[in-house]
Image (tube, rainbow, N blue to C red):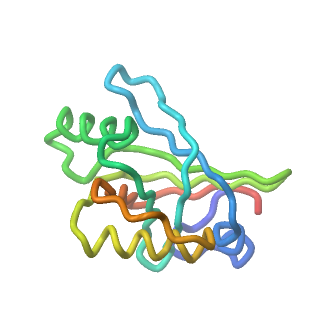
Amino acid sequence: MSHDVLNPTPEYLAFWQERHVCTLTTPRPDGTPHVVPVGVTYDPEAGLARVISNRHSKKVRNVLAAQEAQEAQPQGVRVAVCQMAGRRWATLEGRAVIRTDEASVADAVARYAERYGRTPSPNPDRVVMEITLDRAMGRA
């Protein structure tokens, strides 16, 4: 079932506000999918999903490598985040970029803390993967 990324149903939005481990799928340099568990925050007002991570992680390296390979497409690299609980599921898709500036990282950490009920330990290597969303699917 398709959803409006910027105007999700109340049920769909509520599902993205519950505490769930999600998956993130990024493209490896050879084009195969790399799927890992992550925490995700969804901001429909901005049309963004955010994933905090260490700048040295494989998922971040995948996005950076794909950005370098697609210099003609500076808007980001196609990725997907997904979560499920029983029969409920939700997927968000879009283009990811890596943000390293302090304000973006702090905002993403605060959103993570709100959704997951804990503030991550300080990490000077933390970055945020910011996903500009263009597709939402699911059954919440």
Identify which residue is drawn at 70% across, 79% down.
10
The mark tally for this picture is 0
Return the residue found at the far right.
86
Q: For this view, does 9 lie left or right of residue 56?
A: right
> Is residue 64 depicted above or below 3 in this figure?
above
Q: For this view, does 104 lie left or right of residue 71?
A: right
Query: In which quarter of the view is residue 28 placed?
Result: top left
Position of the N terminus, as image quadrant, is bottom right
Q: Which of 57 and 98 is in front in this view?
A: 57
Identify which residue is drawn at 42% across, 58% down.
52
> Is residue 65 depicted above or below 107 in this figure?
above
> Is residue 120 depicted above or below 75 in this figure?
below
Return the residue found at the far front.
121
Q: Percent position (x, y) of residue 62?
A: 33, 35
Q: Percent position (x, y) of residue 94?
A: 43, 53
Return the residue found at the far left.
71
Q: For this view, does 86 lie left or right of residue 134?
A: right
Q: Percent position (x, y) of residue 79?
A: 44, 45
Identify which residue is drawn at 30% across, 47% down.
55
Q: Percent position (x, y) of residue 98?
A: 28, 54
Q: Which of 33 and 8 is in front in this view?
A: 33
Query: In which quarter of the view is residue 118 placed?
Result: bottom right
Identify which residue is drawn at 76% across, 63% down.
140
